[in-house]
Image: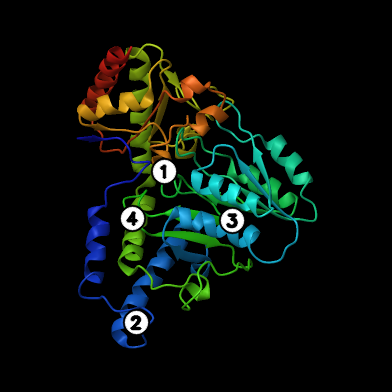
């Protein structure tokens, strides 16, 4: 099997798995218990919180554990805009967000919240002028801007610092869904003006079912769940101790090896694009084309951030007009290749990709998307096998 769907989920790393094991059997105490056995579990949670906070350069008291990225996104949006006083409220988000944001935005609209969906350009970058115009209309409202750090389909990296600066200029709050970016690219929370940030464990070789929400220390959010006093009274329910331990272990690996692994992935990414363009007629790169090296966009220095070229290092997304994406995936599956046509959370939908429509693709082309999200362990032999399999599948489908 060649697994090329790491944007959907990743394999649990050996390090994370070993770190979790004792908390399934030997150290199974309830962290809310006052006796020593329970407090061992509590210490493991706090050690995990400390580690995760250090990777974002924030205080441990600003990290709250959740059940995953979707829960974190819902908490950020609903607590600020869906609950509490009935004053005018305004949510500004992009047209290419994950369904966890877009569907929550639609729910908020049903509650009377004003929602502005800010357009993006052909590469997926937020229209900052449109954002500023919308912010100007948000005076005297509770206003939240929610823009993802990295797009889960086409890999575009937003300029969070510009968005954060503009947001605060109009006294609004800034939330970013960093599920695809966390552990993949550097994130400077304070420099970027981020007030709330969502992240998930299973995207970085940690366990499923655990995530975090960073909440800036001077923000007072209502509780997400009511019951016990866990997470300082804001998220009731017995904590997922093994999950938190595994999340911290996976994050430690991801952040300590970020640049080394990222450089390998982006080299494979660029080779993938090159070979697909050479071998598969009609292929179109979606979003930023890293093979177009314009000096104005990509500085000459050899830093990891500049080499990324404003796209996730392991993201390969193409459209093949005239080819139905789901049919292509089935043919690749027969060859032992796991890929996707877009967000795993939207799989099974009969609608075209909202991301591809937002960047200007036609309905027909938006049905033809193919996303390959790779890891640095991919070999060139596996890459060439995949390119040949795509070429054969396209020929069979035409």
Say left or right for 113 vs 209.
Answer: right
Q: Which mark is residue 208?
A: 4
Real-space Cα distance between discs 2 and 1? Answer: 37 Å
Q: Is residue 292 visible?
A: no
Q: In percent of the image, x 54 and y 22: which residue is there?
A: 294
Sequence-wise, which precedes: disc 3 or disc 2?
Answer: 2
Q: Quadrant of residue 329?
A: top left
Q: Earlier in the sequence, mark 3 or mark 4?
A: 3
Q: Which residue is mark 2?
A: 39
Q: How many marks?
A: 4
Distance in Å between CA atoms under marks 1 and 3: 19 Å
Q: Which residue is mark 1?
A: 345
- Precedes in sequence: disc 2 or disc 1: 2
| Residue 36 image-quadrant placement | bottom left
Disc 1 to disc 4: CB gap under 8 Å: no
- Vertical placement of residue 104 versus 300, above or below: below
For disc 4, the neighbor class at 10 Å (few under 14, some 14 to 19, many from 20) is some
Between disc 2 and disc 4, whose residue precedes?
A: 2
Measured Cα–Cα span from mark 2 to mark 4? 24 Å
Badge 3 vs badge 2, beta-carbon distance below 8 Å: no
Q: Secondary structure at mark 4?
A: loop
Whether residue 80 sits left or right of residue 341 in the image: it is right
How far apart marks 3 and 2 lie (CA) works out to 33 Å
Q: CA distance from mark 3 to mark 4?
A: 22 Å
Q: Residues within 10 Å of mark 3 (few under 14, many from 20)?
A: many
Query: Can residue 48 be seen at all in this image of the molecule?
Result: yes
Which tag is nearer the camera, tag 2 or tag 4?
Answer: 4
Q: Label 2 neighbourhood size at 10 Å, few (<14), some (14-19), many (20+)?
A: some
Quarter where residue 307 is shown: top left
User: Which numbered disc covers residue 77?
Assistant: 3
Please provide percent x and percent y for residue 346.
Answer: 43, 40
Q: CA distance from mark 1 to mark 4?
A: 14 Å
């Amino acid at each position: 099997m060649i697994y090329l769907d790491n944007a959907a989920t990743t394999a649990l790393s050996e390090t994370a798995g070993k770190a979790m094991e004792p908390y399934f059997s030997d150290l199974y105490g309830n962290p809310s218990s006052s006796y020593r056995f329970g407090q061992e579990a509590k210490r493991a949670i706090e050690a995990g919180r400390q580690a995760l906070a250090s990777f974002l350069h924030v205080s441990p008291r600003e990290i709250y554990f959740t059940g995953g990225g979707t829960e974190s996104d819902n908490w950020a949006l609903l607590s600020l805009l869906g609950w509490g006083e009935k004053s005018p409220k305004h949510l500004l988000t992009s047209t290419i967000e994950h369904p966890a944001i877009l569907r929550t935005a639609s729910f908020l609209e049903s509650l009377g919240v004003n929602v502005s969906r800010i357009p993006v350009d052909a590469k997926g970058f937020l229209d900052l002028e449109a954002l500023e115009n919308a912010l100007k209309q948000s005076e005297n409202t509770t206003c939240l801007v929610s823009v993802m750090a990295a797009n889960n389909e086409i890999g575009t990296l937003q300029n969070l610092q510009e968005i954060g600066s503009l947001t605060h200029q109009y006294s609004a709050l800034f939330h970013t869904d960093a599920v695809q970016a966390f552990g993949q690219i550097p994130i400077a929370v304070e420099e970027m003006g981020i007030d709330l940030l969502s992240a998930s464990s299973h995207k970085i070789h940690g366990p499923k079912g655990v995530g975090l929400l960073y909440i800036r220390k001077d923000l007072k959010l209502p509780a997400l769940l009511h019951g016990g006093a866990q997470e300082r009274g804001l998220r009731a329910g017995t904590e997922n101790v093994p999950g938190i331990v595994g999340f911290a272990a996976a994050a430690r690996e991801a952040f300590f090896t970020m640049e080394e692994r990222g450089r390998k992935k982006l080299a494979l990414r660029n080779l993938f694009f090159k070979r697909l363009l050479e071998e598969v007629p009609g292929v179109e790169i979606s979003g930023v084309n890293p093979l177009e090296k314009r000096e104005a966009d990509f500085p000459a220095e050899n830093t990891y951030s500049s080499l990324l070229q404003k796209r996730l290092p392991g993201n390969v997304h193409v459209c093949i007009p005239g080819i139905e994406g789901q049919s292509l995936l089935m043919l690749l599956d027969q060859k032992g290749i796991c890929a996707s046509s877009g967000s795993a959370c939207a799989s099974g939908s009969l609608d075209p990709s909202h991301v591809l429509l937002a960047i200007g693709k036609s309905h027909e082309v938006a049905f033809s998307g193919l996303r390959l999200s790779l890891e640095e362990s991919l070999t060139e032999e596996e890459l060439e096998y995949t390119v040949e399999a795509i070429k054969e599948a396209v020929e069979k489908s035409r």
